[in-house]
Image (spheres, rainbow, N blue to C red):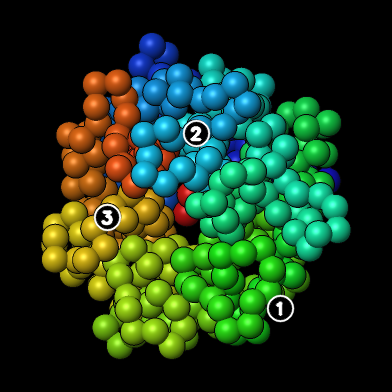
Amino acid sequence: MRPSWVLRTAGALVLLGSLHASSAQDESRPGFLPPSTDRSAFEDHLEGLADSIGRGLSFLAARQARDGSFPCRDAQYEAPTAVTALALLAFLSAGHSEGRGPYSESVQRAIDYLLDQQHTGNDGSAGYIAADGDTTSKMHGHGYATLALSQAYGMTRRASVRNEIREALRLAVRRIEQSQGDEGGWWYEPRKFSGSHENSITITMIQALRAARNSGLYVNPQTISRALRYVRRSQLEDGSFTYKLHDRRSSFALTAAAVSTLNSVGEYDSQMIDRAIDYLDRHDPDIDFRDGLQHFEFYSRLYAAQAYWQYRDLGRWNRWFSRTKRLLKRRQHSNGSWTSLQYGSEYATATSILVLAVPYQYLPILQR
């Protein structure tokens, strides 16, 4: 039986096509628009997006390895599992999927790579998606891979591929459930660690579980409930969210990620969200360089885009996206890439495409 969200995206799928500059789709027609949308504001946002996104996708496709991964050879820290998942999401966010669009082969190879990295056997890590030798991605990579495969599942045509993705998701979800700590959070390793947990991984796990559930997979509701309690208890008085429970260190990046996670489980309108959005307005590292976590700029934008997009006041989204779009267009290189010294050009390019592609709403996680 097809997941319900696939049916909701059927109208958008009719519009799918290449966003490459050589065959750009009509920029005035994003997948969906909220009923109260100011059409003129959206037309301003969409202007030039197809060119930037298309050049970014062209760069990613050229950098993809034979095995389907995105190895990030110019990175200080290589994280092929996480970056491959993010690159797959970038292609999907622009309307390319298995069997559809000029980059369908890149999509299929990325899917195959993630499926090939899933652990089997009885060593306590069955279902874990992690490439051999990747010491950076860890459970972050597993979460992103689960999220990416969940999004690809509903966009995949061939029954054989869909069945393979579904089984991989079933095992990936079980691994997440079995590695949740007593406090409700997760740690870097794919197993339960007493007293070890942190918020950025927990946030990634919640979004992965929610996406899998929306794709028709069974997810234990108690797992999500305990994780949400963990996230909610991590908010400080100023509206920000902390690195981990019982830790006062907070940041723009973690706050944006926490808001987008609460949104993903249906919490859009609460004092907790309002306080967090106000914090984001006051501490955007692209404006206020006193934020000590500026080196997480691409991570910050990835989640801020989702947080502002889902907020009830689209005026805040309009202001943030207008400024961010100009910044990203200025920083895009002639070969279509963006640069991250820590995690590589492929990572920076994939996350930047995901930010710019939000108004198209092809990904279920980006639909208002």
Q: What is the three-letter code of the residue carrying label 1?
A: Gln
Between circles 3 and 2, the one closer to the viewer is 2
| Residue 169 x %, y % | 74, 50
| Residue hosting label 3 | 295
Kindly identify the residue that appears in the image at 83 percent across and 31 percent down.
Answer: 160
Q: What is the three-letter code of the residue carrying label 2?
A: Pro
Would residue 23 appear left or right of 217 to someone viewing this image? Answer: left
Between circles 1 and 3, the one closer to the viewer is 3
Secondary structure under badge 1?
A: helix
**Viewer-proximal residue, 168 or 26?**
168
Asked whether residue 254 is in view, the answer is yes
**In the image, which disc is placed on residue 71?**
2
Cβ–Cβ under 8 Å for marks 3 and 2 = no
Q: What is the three-letter code of the residue carrying label 3?
A: His
Mark 2 surroundings: few (<14), some (14-19) or many (≥20) residues within 10 A: many
Residue 240 lies in what quarter of the image?
bottom left
Kindly identify the residue that appears in the image at 61 percent across and 80 percent down.
Answer: 184
Cα–Cα gap, marks 2 and 1: 36 Å
Mark 1 surroundings: few (<14), some (14-19) or many (≥20) residues within 10 A: few
Extreme-front residue of the structure? 133
Would residue 4 appear left or right of 204 to someone viewing this image? Answer: right
Cα–Cα gap, marks 3 and 2: 20 Å
